[in-house]
Structure formats: C-alpha cells, structure tokens
C-alpha cells in the first residue's frame, strides 16, 4: 500500500493544462470502436480507468494504435465486435462496467465482466432492470466470493423508462443498448446528468434528440467520425481550483477546461461562496464547451448545495467538502446519497478523515454539514483506495498546520496519474 506525505505549501502560481476528461475518454473509445473507419482521438486521458476500457475494446477485436499526437482506433462497425476469450476486467471503473454491460447486451455473443473489490460493491441492478425490460439476459454471479456479471447477448426492443436516480452511467448504458434495439429508447431523469454520450453520438450521425433530463435515441446502422478531441477534465481541474482559492496569494490559470453546464456546477457554487474565478476564451472543443479559468485566492463563505445541483457536481463533493472546512459558516450538502455508492462511501470517508484533521463535519443520511473555518491539523489519513479522496486530502494538507500522510495514495492513477507532478509545477519555489 503506497503512502504519500503531503506538506502545507506556499502560494500556487502559473498555468497548467490538466489531462483529458475521463468520462469523455471512455465514450470516445467505445463509440469509435463500433464506428465505421478510423478515428483519431486526441488528448485521450491515459489513466487506469480509461486503460481498462481500451483493453476491453481490444479484447473484443478492435485494433488500437498509438501515434505521437493521437490514439488511432480502427472501428469495426456496429456488428463487428467479436466474442472475448476471457472475462473482461474493468478494474476500479464503474463507467467501464456500466457502459460495457449496455453495449454487450445487444451483441450476438456472450461475455463476462468483473473488477476489483470496490467495483464488486457498486450497484448493478439499476442497469440490469431496464436492460432486461429491453429483452437483455444479464446475471450477477458469485465467483468464489467475487462478483462476475454475465451478459448473454440478445436481440433488444425499445424502452420507455424513468430512471429512479439521475445517473449518466445508467443512461449511457441504455443508450448504447438502444443503438442495437428494434425500437426507440426514451429515458427521463429526475435531474439532468452529464450529456457527453448524447453529444458524441450526435456528432457521429446517430438519430438522437435530448434536452434537460430526457433523451430519445433510435437504432442506426452506421456511426462515423474522423477525429475526436477530448477536452481537459473539469473534475481534475477542481482540485487546483479549490487549492488556489484556499492558499493565500495564489493565482493560477487552467487552460481549456471542460465547463459543460452538466459538469461544472462547482464553479457556480464556489463563486457564490466568494471565490474569484474568471472564465475567459470560451470556445467549443469536441462538441463541448471549454474555457480558460483564472483563479485567485479568496475568502470563502458557507453555502447551501441542494439536491438539484448534485448531479452536475457529483464527483466534486470531496473537494467541496475540503473548501467548506475553510469557509465561514455552515455549508450544507443535501441529496447526495449517491456518494455512498461511489469508489468508496464518500460521505462516510470524508466525515471520518476530515474529522481526524479537526474539521467540524457532520455526516447525514444523504449529505454533509460542515462548519468552518478550521485550521486543519496534520496526521495520517486514508484514501480508501478512492482517487478523489486522495486528491482532495492533498488539498487539505496544503492548508494544514503540519504534514499529512495519505495512505493508499496510488489510487490517483485511476483518473490522474501525473497529479503530484502537476501540483509541483504550480507550487512557488
Ligand atoms: C460518470 C458518471 C457519474 C460519475 C462518474 C462518471 C460517467 O456517475 O460519478 O465518475 O462517466 O458517466 P453516475 O452514473 O452516478 O452519474
């Protein structure tokens, strides 16, 4: 188990480009694989989770080559995937497991999916139930104490379905299955979740309509696109945004960050809290809105984070919790029960670890209440093998009074292998 000692730091300054977006990278690989012809993917995230999706596409018979400035995927067309020779290993990646289950449900072969111990605990019934309504045959089996998801490919029919919980992974799995169905797939969500699959499918010629909280997709014979450029990941940028706000005298620029409204609610929340964040050079990359962000150290006030905002800042709650420990007043995060079924139970993990540092944080069934500001202590904390916990705790260490040892730090490789190198680039020497 890897530990990392993280120190309080001096101001952050300079400019940085964080790596490509994780969610969009998964979708770029999967959709390129089933498209016609060759797709060049630029700025694909190179991380453990995305690596799992890439290896699985190769197992399914897709040729992928690395070039200096792009990854080249030789699409096999919608019906060109071939049966895998062994179980498809998804590692820690919930996106890989859910999206692949949807894609494999309509193939003319069977496959098996498995992953690490954390993935075994991630709920699958939310994907399996609606897929079964489409005619899919999927079973969760116990293989010597570990879960294996068996997908027996079947002809699929259309679906009209209200998702009980907003989830881009479930929605995307059903849309992928919908590409193979003999009727339209219409989905509604209680709150809009990220719409990257919708945008990419439209750019590849799919018959699809969508709006806030709904989507309708129809089967289509051919998807095609020549190039996909992946924007820089907002969820990775979020750690530097909060660090620059909290560390006195900091001023940084983050280049070409994805600021899709379905992802960047944290920006609005931090601005409401008094954070000085300027968005400049707004433009579109790969069908998604991006901008450069200028962030300056600021004094923060507490805020209220209601359920409707959670889906568009789902992965940023750990770093928002760290920000809230430094904000004046009580920040309440409500309607975030989904955090209990992420890479770890993030509500529990944040409460336990930030309490160890002296923070005033109360765990609630579906959220957190955090009162600040508190000067955090040093010590030893755990990441629970969760990449976003490890990076959020690094930011906590930056504003603590003494060094912090973060256990199981290797987890950062899931989404941001160069996180510490990039962090060092911004620390004033
Ligand atoms: C993701 C969707 C989110 C998010 C996850 C990535 C995706 O999960 O937490 O890290 O790529 O679709 P939900 O399925 O809960 O929306």
Image (spheres, helix red, strand yellow):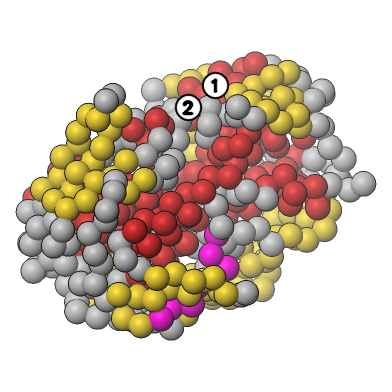
**Residue numbers of the magenta segment:** 38-45
Mark 2 touches mark 1? (CB < 8 Å): yes
Q: Position of residue 53 (x, y in %)?
A: 40, 55
* Number of the label disc, if any, that sits on residue 154: none
At 75% across and 40% down in the image, what residue appears? 246
The disc placed on residue 351 is 1
Q: Give the x, y percent position of residue 33.
A: 35, 70
Q: Name the residue located 84 percent from the left edge and 47 percent from the top edge.
A: 427
Q: Quarter-wise, where is residue 128 in the image?
A: top left
Q: Is residue 416 left or right of residue 349?
A: right
Q: In the picture provided, is 230 more to the left or to the right than 355?
A: left
Is residue 37 rendered to the left or right of residue 258? left
Q: Which residue is mark 2?
A: 347
For the point 65% across and 16% down, the residue is 356
- Picture quadrant of residue 217: bottom left
Queried whether the magenta region covers residue 43, the answer comes back as yes
Q: Is residue 46 among what the camera can see?
A: yes
**SS for dot 1:** helix
User: CB at mark 1 closer than 8 A to ligand 1?
Assistant: no
Instruction: Decide which of 230, 192 is in the foreground and name it.
Output: 230
Mark 2 vs ligand 1: CB under 8 Å? no
Name the quarter where the N terminus is drawn.
top right
Give SS at disc 2: helix
Magenta region, main secondary structure: strand
What residue sits 47% from the left and 55% below the top?
A: 50
């Amino acid at each position: 188990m890897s530990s990392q000692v993280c120190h309080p730091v001096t101001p952050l300054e300079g400019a940085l480009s964080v790596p490509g977006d994780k969610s969009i990278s998964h979708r770029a690989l999967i959709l390129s694989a089933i498209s016609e012809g060759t797709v060049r993917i630029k700025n694909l995230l190179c991380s453990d989770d995305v690596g799992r999706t890439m290896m699985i596409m190769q197992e399914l018979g897709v040729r992928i080559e690395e070039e200096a400035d792009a990854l080249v995927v030789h699409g096999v067309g919608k019906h060109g995937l071939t049966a895998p020779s062994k179980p498809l290993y998804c590692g820690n990646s919930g996106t890989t497991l859910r999206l692949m289950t949807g894609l494999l449900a309509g193939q003319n072969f069977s496959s098996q999916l498995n992953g690490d111990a954390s993935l075994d605990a991630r709920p699958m019934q939310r994907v399996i139930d609606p897929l079964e309504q489409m005619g899919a045959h999927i079973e969760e089996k116990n293989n010597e104490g570990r879960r294996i998801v068996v997908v027996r490919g079947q002809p699929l029919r259309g679906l009209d379905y209200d998702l009980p919980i907003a989830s881009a992974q479930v929605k995307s799995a059903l849309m992928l299955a919908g590409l193979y169905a003999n009727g339209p797939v219409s989905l509604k969500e209680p709150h809009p979740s990220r719409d990257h699959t919708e945008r990419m499918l439209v750019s590849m010629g799919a018959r699809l309509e969508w709006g806030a909280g709904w989507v309708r997709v129809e089967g289509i014979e051919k998807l095609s696109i020549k190039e996909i450029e992946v924007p820089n990941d907002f969820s990775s940028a979020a750690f530097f945004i909060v660090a620059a706000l909290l560390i006195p005298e900091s001023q940084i620029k983050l280049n070409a960050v994805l600021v899709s409204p379905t992802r960047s609610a944290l920006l609005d929340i931090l601005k409401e809290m008094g954070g000085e964040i300027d968005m400049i050079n707004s433009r579109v990359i790969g069908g998604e809105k991006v901008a450069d962000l200028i962030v300056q150290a600021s004094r923060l006030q507490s805020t209220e984070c209601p359920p409707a905002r959670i889906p568009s800042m789902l992965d940023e709650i750990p770093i928002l919790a760290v920000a809230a420990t430094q904000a004046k007043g009580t920040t309440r995060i409500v309607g975030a029960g989904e955090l209990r079924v992420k890479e770890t139970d993030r509500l529990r993990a944040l409460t336990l670890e930030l309490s160890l540092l002296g923070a005033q944080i109360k765990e609630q069934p579906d959220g957190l209440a955090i009162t600040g500001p508190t000067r955090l202590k040093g010590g030893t904390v755990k990441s629970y093998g969760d990449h976003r916990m490890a990076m959020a705790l690094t930011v906590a260490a930056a504003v603590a009074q003494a060094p912090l040892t973060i256990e199981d730090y290797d987890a950062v490789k899931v989404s941001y292998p160069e996180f510490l190198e990039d962090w060092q680039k911004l620390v004033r020497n």
